[in-house]
Image (spheres, rainbow, N blue to C red):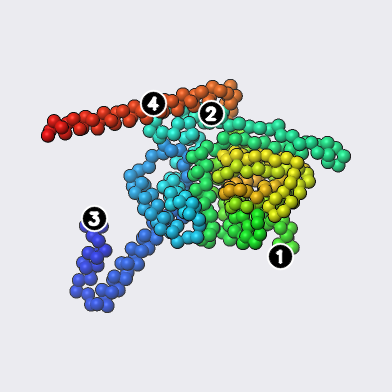
Amino acid sequence: MEFLRSLKKEDILDLLSHDFCSHCQTLLHSRITTLRKRKVDEICSLDDEGFESSGDHVVEMSFNDDASNSESLTKRNESLRNCSQRRDSDTSVKDDEKRVFGSSPGNLVGCKQSDFELLLNDGICEGSSFKNGLSEERKEQIRYSLVCSQKDFSLIERINGRHINVLQGLELHTEVFNELEQRKIVEWIYRLQWRGQQGKLKDRTYSEPRKWMRGKGRVTIQFGCCYNYAVNKSGIPPGIMRDEEVDPLPPVFKQMIKRMVRWNIIPSSCIPDSCIVNIYEEGDCIPPHIDNHDFMRPFYTVSFLSECKILFGSNLQVVSAGEFAGPISLFLPVGSVFVLNGNGADIAKHCIPSVSSKRISITFRKMQPNKLPYKFSPDTDLVGIKPLVFSSLNKSDKAQDEVRNLNIQQQQHKADSVESESDKVWNTKKTSFRVK
């Protein structure tokens, strides 16, 4: 068998077709070519199937830059990368998205679900070879301590004769996902978009309406449930369509949920079971609205690619296509989590004016029990998640000092490595001079 593996296709054909008639030679050639093509297609399709949430072969994104792969895994990733690049050249996605697709298989393919935990925080020191001596628990404590939270939003409006803070219940948590994590999440989302364009997601999961006017036609990808935004042709009002099926939450999104629960952003009593991804191109918007009560409160929006502003008020005005006016606007930084609850979710309307550059958001929501799709099954991966409890950890300057010290150590480690490498090169040259 080892001998056969070492032979080229032409050698095998010559060996097996010896003394065959021309018809049989042609038939054998055709069969070998078909078999070879099928094997190549199977390899190329691994990255498409990788992130499915069933079975033990779930492919996971790793936020941990230190994860080491075997030599065979590296070779397979390289093969998958080449397959993905060839396929990307035939799609209609834009050039920057093609570059993301071309680089993503190395990050997204080849790891089982057990290999991926958001507990492994790479955001402290970026050098994968640098051993900082901290436990994973301590690294998570430091990362968590650097999250900045704001909960004191206020806008007093007169509602039904009473003065009410219509922003009560809003929260903004920044630095939840660092730059590396954002990049990898975005790569996953573009891969999901590509799968939707290729018809590899369920029909109601992916939607890319025709852009018939400015601000209309943003791409949406729904997981967990199918939400109907307007009265449809059958007269069904907006809400969760219980008889429609969409794909379940991908593993990456479940890991994001786990982090937000562990970091006390999402209460363990209201863990999301659905989400919607919005992919904005320049000029896209979301008009004024209050989220449907088929979903429980609170719900959570994570922002990527570019900062944007969100308007709030009990009476928002439509100025023109994609342009709105309201009494207050807040800014949503990339990597942040925006929590909508209380009056901020139920009394004040909100909207996203036309964005000036590409933006991606993921909004996580929990469905009301009586609105669950008929074929919905709870995800066992999202059961029993507990928030972290850190003693005497007050998002202090001490944690930031610790990060700075670690980065200084890392830079010194890199400098020492470079110096050591230079010594090796110089010693090699001296040896060669003596030989001469």
Q: Is residue 120 left or right of residue 278?
A: left
Residue under label 2? 141
- Which type of secondary structure does the marked residue at label 1 adopt? loop
First of labels 3, 2 by sequence position: 3
Label 4, label 3: how far apart the Cα atoms are:
48 Å
* Local secondary structure at mark 4: helix
Q: Residue at x 73, y 42 (%)?
A: 312
Front-most of 99 and 267?
Answer: 99
Sequence-earlier tag: 2 or 4? 2
Q: Residue at x 53, y 31 (%)?
A: 143
Query: Whole-Å distance between the Cαs marked 4 and 1?
Result: 66 Å
Quadrant of res 423: top left
Q: Tell me the residue that label 1 is attached to.
A: 233
Q: Residues within 10 Å of mark 2 (few under 14, many from 20)?
A: many
Q: Residues within 10 Å of mark 3 (few under 14, many from 20)?
A: few
- Give the camera-side residue of 389 and 418: 418
Residue 181 pos. (x, y %): 50, 40
Q: In the shown orientation, is residue 337 left or right of residue 17? A: right
> Which one is in front in this view, the residue at disc 4 or the one at disc 1?
4
The alpha-carbon separation of the residues under discs 3 and 2 comes to: 52 Å
Q: What type is the residue that disc 1 sits on?
A: Lys
User: Which residue is identified by label 3?
Assistant: 2
Mark 1 to mark 3 CA distance (whole Å): 62 Å
Which of the two discs, 4 and 3, labels the residue nearer the N terminus?
3
Query: Of the numbered discs in the image, which one, if any, rests on residue 412?
Result: 4
Using the image, determine if residue 26 lies above or below residue 72.
below
- The quarter of the rendered structure image containing the N terminus is bottom left
